[in-house]
């Protein structure tokens, strides 16, 4: 019988069953007449149906069937598991069962707890992680941690963990049975904190701290259970786009879950601080922080994430007598309230803050504050207003892919170092200040304490990679595990790419990680029909492409980004107007524009086309999500990108785009207090200013640069310790000072360059130096030197310029800047020397510069800095020759020779200027440069002089 | 983990599954599986009184234990049962298989037809292993129909509830159920599954 046939038979059967006994035969005869073969199939069924008893397969049948099956014992009781014999079941959870057992070969019959992990439905991923996690957990040894003793797998491959058996009571029960006063409860709690802190130092987070996991032995020693077990079973998602649901085997205990757990965001050691906070709340008041009992479960996420936690001192009074009385037998709620008021209120509330960054930075800090309270020293926790730092950063998600669970250990890398959004902003290399901002990072205290000289982050990354590589070997054929791994590699890659202390990021390592992720994505795509996986593949290509570009191989980057675009485009055609897809396609086009088309004659146009397409994606995205901050931000950035590309060939067009970007950024500042949007406004003003500068509209240039400056000054005032904002301000001072120089306001130019210098010098002396800061320092020095020369203070100029040059030299030696910059500094020195009347020195400087940049002009046609430097060096030499030619008392022959020389120099300069497509007044390296029109004039001058000498 | 803690989780997961979160269903599976197994075990070891079992099926019991009634609505309940049905089937059949390996028809049992016919006991056969095999055969012919059977029989859903779970009208569901019973009976009689 085929399915189609069955449908026909079924039809007949159904009708027959509904007919009365008299009507059946005629109906059947009719059917058989039409299709004779039906009879052979229908008759046996009808026949069997006669014997069908009424209760067949009705409800009772099932119960009876189940009841009648022979009894069986619980799977493990009495069995041997490895060297242990299982005695009794002592607990059961959603995914694991716990038994009491003893070691069969041990004469002391020491009892242990065995926990079986029920992997059943999940396949290999849990087993694979389990094996590795065991090694890590076995290394934890602390008096307040239930020790992991052993582990293994049964013959059927079911993994189990053998742990110290803790006999005792749950901490909440213990406290109320023993009627412990507050002080003693706090002391117990401190011990629990020690255990958690210890584990954090070993880079293990618990993630499921709750009273049910804290027992107190009969000797009064608290023991924390289940450490890390949760992690084996619950890989996590860190995607925080609101519409993407958390995935993975999430068995949250809502009562104790932190806001970030509920939102599916990254979990940090601060997550454990939160959970400890909840436990403390209960220990001190007898109730939970959100009065869970009366709350509808559906409302839970919102409540935990948004509702203000009531002060413990108030909660005990409001909760009503029974819960409090149960917890504290001799104390009235009012008396308890008085004891809790003040310090303890503040301490608990600080641990329970919604944003992880506003809680205690580490469990140790939490402990210390409690100790302070116990010793009557002032505590650190204060009322909200005191300590609030308005530092919310919004991550712009370029992910656009279905949330996949990432392997837990990777999360440690992501969470202990709180990477802010600016890390992603760092990818916008075209904006120097955005780059500056991307160096923001936070290293968690617990990790800072790690012994050894290797930067903490490197340890974490290395360990994470070891872990992932192990899993990778076991991942073949397991698509879900592969998804998790791919995401994990991508996350590690992004951590690796970050700037590590004084050095640049480990870009090579990042590429390796991204390539591993890409390989996995390809395999997943081949096995899966889901477009989300294909989109993830596009994303994977994009990551690799971007990294290749960042590593200095834009040619190599073209292939992967082309594939990314092709994939996203195809998916977009099948599923138009899908936010995630459009987002990804827009990002791909963005990156393609940034990579450029090296060696392609139509490169500029292609880049503009890419950006324009990205913009049209943005426009669709904005229709789908009109006030979505990240969409708007993307739009603003893309507008700005187009502007940048148009700056040379079409400055007025560029202005338009920058102005549009400015408007969007302004809108963003109204939608979100995030300072990155204020920075966006400032940057837009700066870009507008620079275009005005290029087209020679200096007053407007000044006006916009000043607006840029004003915003940056405000930002720094609001957050004076922020190193990168201050760097940004210093850079802005370069722009305004050179702008003033252009309009002849020398005094103002000097003032601003002075301020810029002051800032950068303060930074250099107070904190660690990094290449970028050095670069900014050098640029400021050069700007100041240029202004001093214009201000007719060549001696001062030269000092400052020498300093700048020295910095460029040291940067060049380690590969952090290009050679042309040293030459450009030499040109400035030459100009200053000439101003001072030291003509021979000036000539030397110019020649020195030319020695470096002359070959570069032809061999490196994209090196604009070299071309500008060469053009100015030539014209500088021309000026010197003119000066020599005008020397009084010179006879005709040498005069003519000088004029001829001048002419040659000016011709060379003019030729070099002609090699620059759209000459500006500021070179890419921030140097102020000459003007080809002036060179043309000078050339004419020499020709006139020469012809008059004949 | 105490049952009460479980409830909040399960209810929340149910709600999310109902809203379309497939991952929530995945998260539910182990919890429900676990609970069903324990309940089944308790019953299978003969600890429970027969009286109670007549009133509710095992799945209903698991549902009561696991889900916080106040907050789960009808939709959630239906979802739960669909899941539980599948698992229940698995548990029971596996169990039967384990303990009745050698015997053909070893899953047979004697049951009361219903409370009303106490006087006339009829010996009937309902071999779970056979039923499972027959049901799988049906699934290859008509997946939706087989699912309906699973929901009704193993999940204890009513006709109306099962109908809505598989997206058909109640009238259609009634016909599907009726024809399925006949077919399965026939299949089992003729010895499908061995």
Image (cartoon, coloured by chain):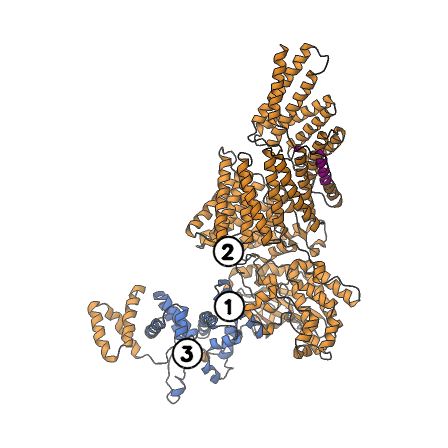
Disc 2 crowd rating (10 Å Cα; few below 14, some 14-19, many 20+) is: some
Helix, strand or loop status at disc 2? loop
Magenta residue check for A574:
no
Chain label for disc 1: B
Which residue lies under the disc numbered 3?
A59
Farthest residue, direction front: A699
Q: Nearer the viewer, mark 3 or mark 1?
A: 1
Relative to B62, residue A349 above or below: above
Disc 3 crowd rating (10 Å Cα; few below 14, some 14-19, many 20+) is: many
Q: Position of residue A64 (x, y in %)?
A: 43, 80
Farthest residue, direction bottom: B119
Helix, strand or loop status at disc 1? helix
Magenta residue check for A745:
yes
Q: Position of residue A285 (x, y in %)?
A: 69, 73
Q: Earlier in the sequence, mark 2 or mark 3?
A: 3
Which residue lies under the disc numbered 1?
B15
Q: Quadrant of the N terminus of chain A?
A: bottom left
Chain label for disc 2: A
Q: Which chain is the one coloured orange?
A: A
Q: In the picture provided, is A698 more to the left or to the right than B168?
A: right
Q: Nearer the viewer, mark 1 or mark 2?
A: 1
- Residues at marks 3 and 1 on the same chain: no
């Amino acid at each position: 019988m085929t399915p189609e046939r069955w449908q026909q038979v079924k039809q007949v059967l159904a009708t027959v069953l509904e007919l009365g006994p008299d009507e059946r035969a005629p109906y059947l005869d009719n059917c058989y007449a039409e299709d004779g073969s039906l009879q052979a199939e229908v008759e046996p069924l009808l026949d069997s149906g006669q014997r069908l008893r009424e209760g067949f397969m009705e409800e009772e049948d099932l119960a009876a069937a189940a009841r009648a099956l022979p009894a069986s014992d619980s799977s493990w009781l009495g069995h041997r598991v490895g060297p242990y014999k299982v005695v009794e079941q002592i607990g059961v959870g959603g995914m694991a069962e716990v038994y009491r057992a003893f070691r069969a070969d041990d004469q002391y019959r020491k009892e242990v707890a065995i926990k079986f992990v029920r992997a059943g439905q999940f396949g290999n991923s849990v087993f694979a992680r389990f094996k590795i996690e065991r090694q890590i957990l076995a290394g934890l040894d602390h008096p307040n941690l239930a020790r992991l003793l052993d582990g293994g797998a049964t013959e059927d491959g079911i993994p189990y963990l053998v742990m110290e058996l803790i006999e005792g009571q749950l901490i909440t029960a213990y406290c109320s049975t023993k009627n412990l006063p507050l002080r003693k409860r706090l002391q117990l709690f401190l011990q629990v904190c020690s255990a958690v802190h210890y584990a954090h130092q070993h880079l293990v987070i618990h993630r499921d701290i709750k009273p049910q996991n804290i027992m107190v032995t009969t000797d009064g020693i608290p023991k924390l259970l289940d450490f890390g077990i949760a992690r084996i079973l619950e890989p996590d998602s860190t995607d925080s786009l609101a519409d993407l649901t958390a995935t993975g085997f999430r068995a949250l205990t809502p009562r104790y879950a932190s806001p970030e757990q509920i939102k599916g965001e990254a979990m940090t050691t601060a997550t454990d601080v939160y959970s400890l906070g909840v436990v403390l709340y209960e220990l001190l008041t007898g109730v939970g922080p959100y009065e869970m009992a009366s709350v509808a479960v559906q409302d839970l996420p919102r409540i935990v994430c948004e509702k203000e936690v009531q002060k413990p001192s108030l909660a005990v009074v409001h909760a009503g007598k029974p819960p409090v009385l149960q917890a504290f037998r001799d104390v009235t709620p009012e008396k308890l309230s008085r004891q809790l008021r003040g310090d303890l209120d503040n301490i608990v509330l600080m641990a329970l803050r919604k944003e992880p960054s506003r809680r205690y930075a580490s469990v140790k800090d939490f402990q210390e504050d409690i100790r302070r309270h116990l010793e009557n020293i002032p505590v650190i926790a204060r009322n909200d207003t005191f300590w609030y730092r308005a530092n919310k950063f919004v991550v712009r998600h370029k992910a656009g892919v279905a949330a996949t669970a990432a392997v837990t250990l990777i999360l440690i890398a992501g969470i202990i170092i709180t990477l802010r959004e600016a890390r992603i902003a760092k990818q916008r290399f075209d904006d120097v200040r955005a780059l500056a901002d991307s160096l923001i990072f936070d290293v968690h205290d617990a990790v800072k304490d790690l012994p050894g000289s290797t930067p903490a982050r490197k340890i974490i990354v290395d360990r994470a990679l070891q872990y992932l590589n192990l899993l990778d070997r076991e991942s073949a054929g397991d698509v879900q595990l592969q998804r998790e791994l791919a995401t994990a590699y991508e996350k590690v890659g992004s951590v690796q790419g970050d700037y590590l202390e004084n050095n640049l990021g480990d870009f090579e390592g990042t590429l390796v990680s991204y390539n591993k992720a890409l390989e996995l994505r390809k395999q997943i795509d081949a096995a899966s029909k889901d477009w989300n996986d294909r989109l993830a593949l596009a994303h994977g290509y994009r990551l690799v492409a971007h990294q290749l570009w960042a590593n200095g191989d834009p040619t190599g980057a073209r292939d992967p980004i082309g594939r990314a675009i092709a994939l996203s485009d195809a998916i977009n055609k099948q599923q138009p107007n899908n936010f995630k897809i459009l987002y990804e396609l827009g990002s791909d086009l963005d990156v393609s524009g940034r990579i450029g088309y090296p060696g392609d004659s139509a490169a500029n146009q292609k880049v503009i086309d890419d950006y324009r397409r990205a913009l049209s994606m943005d426009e669709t995205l904005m229709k789908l999500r009109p006030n979505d901050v990240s969409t708007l931000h993307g739009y603003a950035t893309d507008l700005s990108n187009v502007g940048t590309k148009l700056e040379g060939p079409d400055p007025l067009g560029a202005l338009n785009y920058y102005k549009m970007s400015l408007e969007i950024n302004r809108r963003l500042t109204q939608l979100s207090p995030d300072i990155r949007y204020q920075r966006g406004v400032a940057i837009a003003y700066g870009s507008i200013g620079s275009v005005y500068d290029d087209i020679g509209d200096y007053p407007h240039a000044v006006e916009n640069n000043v607006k840029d400056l004003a915003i940056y000054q405000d930002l720094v005032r609001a957050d004076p310790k922020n190193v990168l904002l201050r760097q940004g301000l210093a850079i802005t001072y370069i722009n305004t000072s050179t702008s003033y120089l252009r309009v002849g306001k020398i005094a103002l130019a000097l003032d601003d360059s002075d301020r810029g210098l002051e800032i950068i010098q303060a930074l250099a002396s107070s904190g660690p130096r990094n290449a970028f800061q050095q670069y900014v320092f050098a640029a400021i020095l050069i700007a100041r030197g240029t202004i001093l020369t214009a201000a007719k203070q060549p001696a001062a100029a030269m000092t400052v310029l020498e300093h700048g040059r020295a910095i460029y030299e040291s940067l060049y030696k380690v590969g952090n800047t290009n050679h042309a910059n040293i030459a450009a500094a030499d040109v400035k020195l030459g100009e200053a020397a000439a101003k001072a009347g030291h003509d021979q020195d000036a000539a030397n400087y110019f020649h020195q510069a030319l020695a470096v940049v002359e070959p570069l002009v032809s061999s490196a046609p994209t090196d604009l800095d070299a071309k500008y430097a060469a053009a100015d060096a030539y014209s500088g030499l021309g000026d010197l020759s003119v000066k020599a030619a005008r020397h009084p008392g010179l006879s005709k022959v040498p005069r003519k020779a000088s004029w001829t020389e001048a002419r040659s120099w000016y011709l060379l300069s003019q030729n070099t200027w002609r090699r620059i497509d759209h000459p500006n007044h500021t070179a890419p390296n921030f140097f102020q440069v000459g003007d080809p029109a002036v060179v043309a004039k000078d050339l004419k001058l020499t020709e006139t002089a020469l012809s008059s000498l004949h | 983990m105490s049952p009460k803690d479980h409830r909040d989780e399960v209810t929340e997961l149910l709600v999310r599954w109902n809203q379309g979160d497939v991952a929530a269903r995945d998260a539910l599976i182990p919890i429900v599986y676990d609970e069903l197994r324990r309940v089944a075990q308790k019953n299978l070891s003969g600890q429970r009184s027969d009286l109670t079992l007549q009133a509710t099926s095992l799945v209903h019991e698991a549902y009561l234990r696991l889900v916080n009634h106040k907050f789960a609505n009808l939709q959630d309940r239906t979802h739960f049962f669909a899941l539980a049905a599948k698992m229940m089937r698995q548990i029971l059949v596996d169990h039967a298989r384990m303990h009745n390996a050698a015997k053909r028809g070893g899953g047979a049992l004697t049951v009361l037809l219903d409370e009303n016919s106490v006087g006339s006991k009829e010996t009937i056969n309902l071999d779970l292993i056979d039923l499972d095999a027959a049901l799988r055969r049906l699934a290859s012919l008509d997946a939706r129909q087989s699912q309906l059977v699973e929901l009704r029989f193993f999940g204890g859903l009513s006709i109306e509830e099962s109908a809505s779970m598989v997206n058909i009208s109640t009238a259609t569901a009634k016909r599907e159920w009726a024809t399925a019973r006949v077919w399965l009976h026939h299949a089992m009689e003729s010895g499908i599954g061995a």
